[in-house]
Image (cartoon, rainbow, N blue to C red):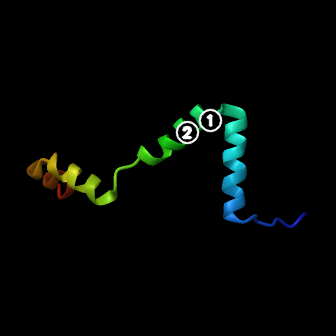
Amino acid sequence: MKASTFIKEEKLITQAIDTLIDRLGPVETNRFLSLLKTGRVESVKRHKLWQSKLKKEKFLNTVFKE
């Protein structure tokens, strides 16, 4: 089995972006990279949003039902 070596992060990022640009073009590469940034809501904000929509009595009855 061949031992694997990791390339430095800078080189990895450069090669990955170059590959994307070669295959997709600069506009689609930029669009793809932008998708990664907007996908998730920060966990505390997500939790507060969940709490704001929560029906307290229904939730407690579900959690503590006998």
Q: Secondary structure at mark 1?
A: helix
Mark 2 and mark 1 residues within 8 Å of each other at the beta carbon: yes
In terms of secondary structure, where does tag 2 sit? helix
Q: From the viewer's perspective, is 29 left or right of 53? A: right
Say which amino acid is labelled 1.
Pro
Q: Residues within 10 Å of mark 2 (few under 14, many from 20)?
A: some
Q: Would residue 28 be found to the left or right of residue 23 on screen?
A: left
Q: Identify which residue, 57 or 66, lies in the foreground.
A: 57
Amino acid type assigned to the residue bearing label 2 in the image:
Asn
Question: Which quarter of the figure is the N terminus placed in?
Answer: bottom right
* x, y percent for residue 15: 73, 51
Residue found at the far left of this picture: 57
Q: In which quarter of the view is residue 64 placed? A: bottom left
Horizontal side of 65 relative to 47 (left or right) equals: left
Quadrant of the snapshot with the C terminus: bottom left
Location of residue 11 in the rendering, given as x and y in whole percent from the top left corner: 72, 59
Residue 30: assigned label: 2
Alpha carbon distance from label 2 to label 1: 6 Å
**Any mark on residue 26, and which?**
1
Tell me the residue at 15%/50% (across/down): 52
Badge 1: few (under 14), some or many (20 or more) residues near its Cα, within 10 Å?
some
